[in-house]
Image (spheres, rainbow, N blue to C red):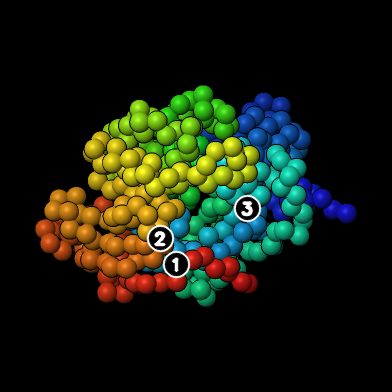
Amino acid sequence: MTSLMQTLDQLTAPGELFLKEEEGALRCVACAHRCLLRPGRRGICQVRFNREGELRVPWGYVAALNVDPIEKKPFAHLLPGSDVLTFGMLGCDFHCSFCQNWEISQEFCDPASGLGPYSIQRISPEQVVAIAQRNGAELIASSYNEPLITSEWAVGIFRLAQKAGLRCAYVSNGNATPEVLEYLRPYLVAYKIDLKTMQDPHYRQLGGVLKNVLESIQRAHSLGLWVEVVTLVVPGFNDSTDELWEMARYLVSVSPDIPWHVTAFHPDYKMTDRSGTPASALQQAAEIGQEAGLHYVYAGNLPGRVGSLEDTFCPNCQTRLIQRRGYVILDYQITAQGTCPKCGRQVAGVWSAHPEQVRRGGWGMPRQAGM
């Protein structure tokens, strides 16, 4: 019987994100691990490998493919009310104990995942774009597992998506390199980054380095990508007042217009030794973000339990511009020029040029995208 890894090794293409080293070795630059791949060796992600001096990277399949509300990513300032076709592959460069997509992200690190070769769907970039168009999606996003490690595949899709008039986004852990961000920049409109903690030892427990993530936030913003940041508030891990203040101050130092989503943890994967995040903790974290000077702070994963922290307000006159409940837009007041209708303040984000067409009261849940 063919193993999943054998199947995936066949579903590869020549990679582009690497530097040549001596004796046939390659330095992968898809993520900040910068793995040195000697012939026959794999990177930390397990899906990028050196085959006789050629970098091979994932291509031609998906492990997840769904039509989501853009609010689920979450993006609050990227074409609200629109649908996004989201695709994911297998593998990750982190090993977070609280991962909510661990079945696909940790397939090669954790035998408990147990996926087989029939868990993937062979597909071409042309088919992905056609599915997005058929389902009325305005955007295509790479998510579910870590998209940085499959960036060549994403760009293969995004090139066609752009030609079809679709916009493209990444939902990432932010463990990026300058090389991969420059590679992605021509195709991306938006980049969502997880800021998991401000403690480097905690980041190293997850498989990363704090400095790399902070630099990715700064660099993505400076490249002109629309950046939103998400922090999963985990009790006993990153929920201290001091740490939340440190996160908020850092984001303000990059730009006070970066939306910060503080979202609720629920026990999952290997972290089942603590309860979920209460609404009061999210409200406290959001208040810290607001006091630090962030213009747009949101509390997520607990719809209807965090008051107005699901909504968007004008930072100048405090007019409510977007009213939400969960992933559903209830009211939308931003003008076609992206301004507050009351005071004229420009609202940071990527907005619809036809606000009258923004979907209110949508279905608000993901749905599987069929071939």
The numbered mark, 1 or 3, whose residue comes first in the sequence reads 3
Q: Quadrant of the C terminus?
A: bottom right
Q: Residue at x 63, y 44 (%)?
A: 269
Q: Is residue 276 visible?
A: yes
Q: Is residue 99 visible?
A: no
Name the element at disc 2: loop
Q: Position of residue 35 (x, y in %)?
A: 62, 31
Is 355 located above or below residue 14 in the figure?
below
Is 172 located above or below residue 334 in the figure?
above
Q: Residue at x 29, y 37 (%)?
A: 288
The numbered mark, 2 or 3, whose residue comes first in the sequence reads 3
State the residue position of label 2: 326
**Label for residue 262?**
none
State the residue position of label 3: 89
Q: In the image shown, does 106 or 88 lie closer to the viewer?
A: 106
**Within 10 Å of the Cα at label 1, are there few (<14), some (14-19), or many (20+) other Cα atoms?**
some
Residue at the far top in the pictured view? 201
Gap in Å between the C-alphas at discs 1 and 3? 24 Å
Residue type at mark 2?
Gly
Name the element at disc 1: loop
Residue type at mark 3?
Met
Q: Position of residue 366 (x, y in %)?
A: 52, 65
Residue type at mark 1?
Gly
Gap in Å between the C-alphas at discs 2 and 3? 26 Å
Q: Is residue 16 left or right of residue 317?
A: right
